[in-house]
Each structure stands twice: as structure tokens, then as C-alpha cells.
Image (cartoon, grey):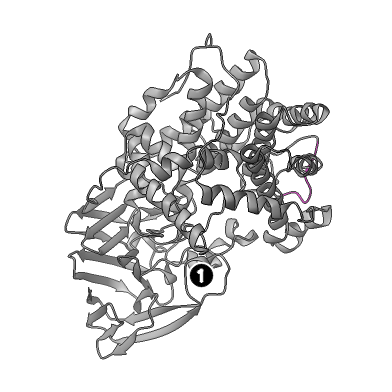
Amino acid sequence: MHFSIDSNIALKRLHFDKIADVPETLKNDLIETAGRMLSDPMDYLPLSLYKDFSRTGNRENYETPYFRKRIRLSTLVIAELIEDKGRFMDRIEDEIWSLLGEPGWVLPPHNTYVRDTPTLPVPDTGRPVLDLFALESGEIVALALNLLEAKLTPSLALTIESEIRKRIIDPYLSSWFWWMGWKGEEKLNNWTVWCTQNLLLAAFAIRLSQDEYHQILDKALSSLSDWYSQYGDDGCCDEGAHYWHAAGLCFWGAIRIVNEVSGGALERLFKEDKARNIASYITNMHIEGEWYINFADCSPKAGELGAREYLFGKDVSDNTLIRQSMLDFREHIRRLEAGEKLPFDDNQYNLWYKWLKYRYASELSLNELPDAEEAKPYVYYPSVGISIYRKGKTLLAVKTGCNDDSHNHNDTGSMILSIGSHPVLVDIGVETYTRKTFSSERYTLLPMQSLYHNVVNFDGVGQSAGREYKATEVISCKDGIEMELAHAYPEGTVESYKRKVLFSENRIQFSEIVRNGKNPVLSLIVMDKPVIEEGSVSAEKWRISFENADDIKLERLDITDNRLRIAWPDKLYRLLISFSSKLDWSVEI
């Protein structure tokens, strides 16, 4: 499929409605937060801090002040729009000037012109790299200009437009980066839609000629077409529920912007089953409360839903997504009123997202909730190989597919089991990103290895990464699933490894059948510290019983990483169950 619009359509600059009727709790929290920011010191990003990533592999040292600057600017802009007294303008202009003074907006781990090649230690100001956050920086500054143009110093407004042209528009039109796609020849991921969405925001927030607008839109639509063509018709995000917010949801964002500037040229797209499937993915992956099924680089607390998800739901007529977005938003306000800790949100800096949040806050808070619809008892996503089973409070998710997903973990055949919001069999998730995370050393990290997922491994040998390492002979149906997993391991590791699962509300049965595999050991990661008894392990809410187990061992996994601690307590536990050739086991709820 190729998206296109008539070249004779007159394209419009983006227009943003006035923000009104913001719930008092939300408004007061914003104004108080912005008021405190006025006394924050300005953040400075010296060259030595940029070069620190090349020297140490640490991303946080540079990214913490980098994102703090952008969060502060976006927050101050929205506060000024709502309060409208000019109180925040001096600091807003200081923050804009500071961003414009950064030689490069690309993050250190992304500072390269060719995908998956070593990064350069400093940015080349004459040849900007367009990464996720260079484009997000452009979006923030361009929207600040659009929203506050009448209040900005005129010469600063002109400088903003000039810098957007130099740093964003010109390199976009004159260069090619892998995320732009090329006739389906490049494997794409969230970068394509996330970058393209923010490119469109930056471009259409400022004044350009019709010719420039059309050049930009033609190139953006080519990228979006490539991404959409590669995405499964079932709507499954292989990068996990957390990255859906930067993948499927950014696709919606990009198409919504196209429709706004073109007078609805692609509105028909939201009537397609595929677009609706992309939208419904996130509610299918929802377990309960803050908890989500979290395969790939994803936290089990994958982020609350809000204005973007609500509007996506409205565009595709998905009442379940609309309802969950409204419920999450109301819970967000309840927590603010109660002074409780808010759910994790790793994108507090995007100015458009903030504008949407406050622009639609009244609808989210006050409109009537759609009626609740019963969750589907069985969902199967063949494009990625995810089966989801629900009955009562019990949820089981099983991943087949291959070990070549974007943000891949070597986890083919692994499972997640939950009793409501209480995790039983867990996927650890992903640690704070460092240089190792996206390098040849990725699979030296424990959470990426099948040894730390809920599958069998052989004499300490786990699965390998790559499209050829996959599940075969998969049969998924409403009652359970079976698969052959031998091909997920290095050649010669095991002749055959069949896993069978039979699902019911109070008892899930598993069978591991191995032929010619050395020292098979089933690894199970659990949150509760279990009591080991003869032939079984148990905790308050569950019991796992084993037949033909030779030995059961327990290891403690200390959780010290800041990103993992968002979801997990300070300890998880790894059960190691050794057996000979066949292990039958069951989980009783």
C-alpha cells in the first residue's frame, strides 16, 4: 500500500485550539509545577558530557539533563497557555535559547549516519543526524513558536524558524536515514513513525511554501507506507506494549497530522481493519490496573493511557480503548488529588502530547464512559506469535514466533501468567539502556537470555538470536497451544523440544518433551518467594506441581536497576527444575 494525496491540495499550517475547562486538580498541579521550575537552575550540556557516552557507554549522564530541559520547556509553554499572564515567558525564552544553543540535538548513542555502526563522539553541526530526539527537539521548539508566537520576542521567533530549517527541514529533504525506509528494503520499527510524526509537527508548525510542504509530505507518506506495509495485518507490535506508544500510536499521530493539514485526505485509513487492529492491540495486552503483558523491551508497567489513545479510539470507533483511556486519565487525577505517586511516563517532554492532554482533559474527565465490553477469552497474533488466554482473573500469554523481533529477547516459547494484577510467571523486562543494550553484547545481558525466561535450556545453553531461531509446528487454539522449540537453539543443542499448554481458569497444565537434549533444565521466573516442597513449589496465591522432576533449585535475583525497579520489588526468584526427557507440570491458582 502506498499513501498519497493530490498534489493540488492546498496544505495548511497546523492550528491549535485554545485550551479551556481544564479540571482544577490538573490545572493547579501544572501551574504549581511550572512555578517551581522558574527557580530551577538552567541545565548545561558541555561537550565533555556528550563525549562521555563514547568513553563509558553510560547514557543517563547526558540524557538526564537533556530531557530535563525539554520537560521544563514543554511544561512552561502549556502553563503559559493556560494561565495567560506572561509570568513564564522569560524562562520559556531562556529555555528555547538554550536548546538553540546546543550544537546538535542528536543523542550520543544515535550519533551515526549508518544504521548499527559505531557512533561518532561529537555531532557534526554542518550535517545534522535526524534521530528520534533531534526531531522531538524540533517539534518542541516549533510548537512553542506556533503556540506562543504573539508573545515571543520577534527576532527570537525568526531565529526559531531559521534553526528549524537548518536542523530539521533541510537535512530531511536532502538526506536519507535508515528509518525513512526505501521501497520495503529496510526493516523498519518504531523509529519510522515516531520520527515522521515529529518531523510533520515541526514542519507544519512553522511557515513554509506550498512546494516545501508537499515535498515533506510526499517523503513522509512514503516512509509511513513502508512501515504500514511491514506491520502485521493483525496489528501486533513486536516491540512490546511499551513501544506501541511510540509505534502504532505514533502512526495514528502522523496520520492525524496529515489529515489536519490536508483537510482529511487519509481519513479513510481509520476505517480499515488493520488500523483498528493496531489500536486494539494495547487493550488486548492489558492485564489489570497498571500491568501489561510485556514481551520484548517492555516493562510490565507499560504506561497509562490518555488523550492520544482516547483520540485513536475515537478515530477507529474502539470503545474499549476509549473507555480504558478515560479510566486511566481519571485514575491519574485521583492520584494527583490524593498526593500519590503517578504511573511511570517516559515521555513527558513532547509538547504536542502535553497539549493534547490538557486540550482533551475535560472530555476525558467528564464524558460518559462507554459500556464495558467483556475481554476476549482468546486472542492470537500470528504475525508475532503471541497467544493470550483469559478466564476470570487468570491470564496466560505465550510467545512463539522467532528471535528476530525489534527489541528482541531470546524468549521463543516463553510465558507470562498473572492472577489479576498479581504476577505469577514473569518476564523481567529490560534494564536501563546502556551502550551494551543495542550492540553485539546485547545477549550478554541477563534479561535478554532465554536462561532468564520461562523455557527449558540445555546444560546452560540458551536460545540464539536471529530469524532462523524460531518456533515451528505451532498449533494455537482457544484451549491451549503446542509448539516445537528445537529450532530456537543453536544447531546440535537438542533434537526435539516440544512444549504443550492446556489452559483453564484455576489450573494450567504444561508438558515439556525433550529428545536428545543434554541436561534439560526448566527456568521459571516468579515474583513471590516460593516454598519448595517435594515435587512442588508454592506461594500464597499459587502452587506449581511437577511430575518427573529430578531436582528443584531456587535462586534469588536482586533487582537494583532503576528501570526494573519501576515495576518490581527488590527481589525476583528463579526456579531451576532439572529433568531427563519429559516434565509434566501444572500451576494451580
Q: Where, quadrant-wise, is the N terminus in this rendering? A: top left
| In this picture, residue 45 sits left or right of residue 110 | right
Which percent across, then down, holds residue 31?
A: 63, 49
Which percent across, then down, holds residue 273?
A: 30, 33
Q: Is residue 183 visible?
A: no
Q: Nearer the viewer, residue 302 or 212?
A: 302
Q: Quadrant of residue 417?
A: bottom left
Image point (77%, 55%), residue name: 39
368 relative to 345, above or below:
above
Image point (54%, 40%), residue name: 194
As drawn, the residue found furthest toward the bottom would be 534
| In this picture, residue 87 sits left or right of residue 155 | left
Which percent across, then down, holds residue 321?
A: 35, 44
441 relative to 236, above or below:
below
- Give the residues in magenta: 119-125
Amino acid at pointer 1: Leu
What predominant SS class does the magenta segment belong to?
loop
Image point (69%, 32%), residue name: 148
Residue behind mark 1:
446
| In this picture, residue 252 sits left or right of residue 88 | left
Q: Is residue 56 magenta?
A: no
